[in-house]
Amino acid sequence: MIITIDGPAAAGKGTLAGKLANKYNLAYFDTGMVYRAVGLEMILGGYEPSDAAIAEDFAKNLTFPRMIELSQNPIFRSLEGSKAASAVAAIIPVREALLQMQQNFSKRPVFADGTSAKGAIYDGRDTGTVVCPQADIKFFVTALPEVRAERRYKEYLQKGIASDYQEVLEQTIARDKNDFARPSSHPAKDAIIFDTSYLSIEEVFAKACKIIENYQKTLEK
Ligand code: DC
């Protein structure tokens, strides 16, 4: 079973994906990591993240182990890392170069320890439209920018990262503008949309579980 969860930053995709992966014993692919990895290669190499030719080169040479290695760097999930990821993700040849790696995972999904899984959950922006258009179930998780900025801001405070709510809001809006300029980031026609502005993660999780279990019942018939 392949499930995709797309939507903007800080909408709750990762939390939902983690809970579903755990409950249904599915491997999890956070596809933002491939763009964060290329973005970080650009930072570490001293390049402008918008330098298309260099970014494409890094994308073509990215491997799963290198991505995992880069994810240990504190810049990977930082604001600087997010900005670089968003910039490289806007370069079409970079997206094309990273597509195969993401699609291969659905053919042979594996858990973090390398053992094989019966299915996968993808989280990203275009996993239901481009990476896995054949997915069994597609979710699109969204929330108002103000709600998402508030969540990110609290997350930074908890991690002891100095930040300012207004600045986080502006960055959230700027990243949305960049990420959603691509039609592929919009919900797939067959996606089920959850707005987490007014729903708790537990409510969204319960709704998603119901949909998955109904789907599983149709397979048993
Ligand atoms: O989900 P995230 O914040 O880790 O993603 C980092 C960046 O990567 C984000 O700005 C958009 C981009 N991205 C994308 O374009 N397509 C995906 N499938 C996943 C992420």
Image (cartoon, grey):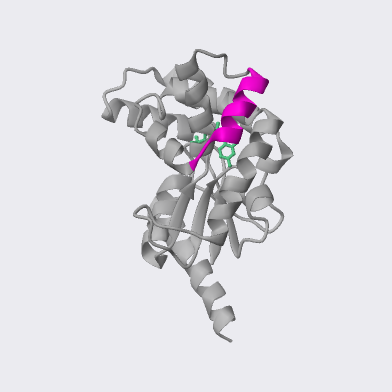
Relative vertical location of residue 112 with respect to residue 206 in this rendering, above or below: above
Q: Nearer the viewer, residue 62 or 80?
A: 62
Relative vertical location of residue 41 with respect to residue 203 in this rendering, above or below: above
Give the quadrant of the N terminus.
Answer: bottom right
Picture quarter containing residue 191?
bottom right
In this rendering, would 158 be left or right of 14? left
Observer able to see residue 168: no
Picture quarter containing residue 133?
bottom right
Relative vertical location of residue 137 with respect to residue 112 in this rendering, above or below: below
Q: Nearer the viewer, residue 215 or 135?
A: 135
Residue extending furthest toward the bottom: 221
All told, the count of numbered labels is 0
In this rendering, would 153 be left or right of 109? left
Report the image quarter containing ligand 1.
top right
Q: Magenta region: which residues?
A: 51-63
Report the residue at 46% width, 29% height from top.
149
In this rendering, would 77 be left or right of 181? left
Give the quadrant of the C terminus.
Answer: bottom right
Q: Position of residue 11 (x, y in %)?
A: 49, 41
Name the chief secondary structure element in magenta: helix
Report the residue at 68% width, 50% height from top.
129
Observer able to see residue 95: yes
Q: Position of residue 81 (x, y in %)?
A: 46, 24
Report the residue at 30% width, 26% height from top.
157
Does the segment drawn in magenta span residue 55?
A: yes
Q: Position of residue 158 (x, y in %)?
A: 27, 30
Q: Position of residue 109 (x, y in %)?
A: 49, 59
Report the residue at 61% width, 40% height from top.
98
Does the segment drawn in magenta span residue 108?
A: no
